[in-house]
Amino acid sequence: NEYKSYLRLFMSTVARNNSVSRKHTFNEKSRNEKGTRSSIDHTKHAEEQDLEFKKRLEEVTELLDAATKLTNKEKLVLSKWIKKLKKCGEAPHELKNWREIRNEYTHLMINQLRRYEVLEPFRTAPDNGPLKPVSKKLAYTKMKFTLCAEPDP
């Protein structure tokens, strides 16, 4: 029951955030005569996502440097995940929304590191294929971490 309430809250938050970001990024002035988004808007959106990833990656690096409670094995696995996230988009068979997926994983990693925990999917090294979308179970975990207060240092 608690899971369902967190999931509903998460989904409503995601829907609200997506509609706000779409309105901001793809407003009516940016549409051409046919009502489709221009390639300039897609490029701007991609640049914003890349900038967000860069900021999150800096935070992950800082958190990893300060994470004295993590084992060397956990740090090694996390570094493999970071390498994979950095290489996203290089393979021709990546999903169209690979930037969003990459940023979701990075956000999930930050929330776990803030709690001094390493949970799925970061307990094992990433597979060689493209990133899969964040599962509902992981989305719930992400929401739960986001709703919780940050731990005392």
Image: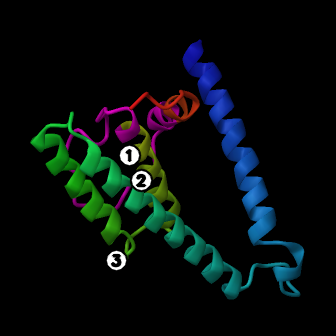
Expressed as whole percent of the image width and height from the top left, the position of residue 110 reads 41, 46
Residue 123 to residue 51: above or below: above
Proximity of marks 2 and 1: CB atoms separated by less than 8 Å: yes
Q: Circle 3 — which element? A: loop
Is residue 97 in view?
A: no
Q: Main secondary structure of the magenta part?
A: loop
Q: Report the mark closest to the observer, 1 or 3.
A: 1
Reading the image, the residue beneath label 2 is 106
Amino acid carrying label 1: it is: Met
Residue 150 to residue 59: above or below: above
Q: Is residue 101 left or right of residue 32?
A: left
Amino acid carrying label 2: it is: Thr
Residue 78 to residue 30: above or below: above
Q: Report the mark closest to the observer, 2 or 3.
A: 2
Q: Is residue 46 magenta?
A: no
Image: magenta residue range: 113-142
The residue shown at (66%, 45%) is 14
Q: Is residue 119 magenta?
A: yes
* C-alpha gap between disc 2 and disc 1: 5 Å
Expressed as whole percent of the image width and height from the top left, the position of residue 101 reads 47, 57
Reading the image, the residue beneath label 1 is 109
Expressed as whole percent of the image width and height from the top left, the position of residue 109 reads 38, 46
Quadrant containing the N terminus is top right
Expressed as whole percent of the image width and height from the top left, the position of residue 62 reads 33, 54
Q: Local crowd at mark 2 within 10 Å, few (<14), some, or many (≥20)?
A: many
Q: Is residue 3 left or right of residue 27?
A: left
Reading the image, the residue beneath label 3 is 90
Question: On the image, which quarter does residue 56 sit in?
Answer: bottom left
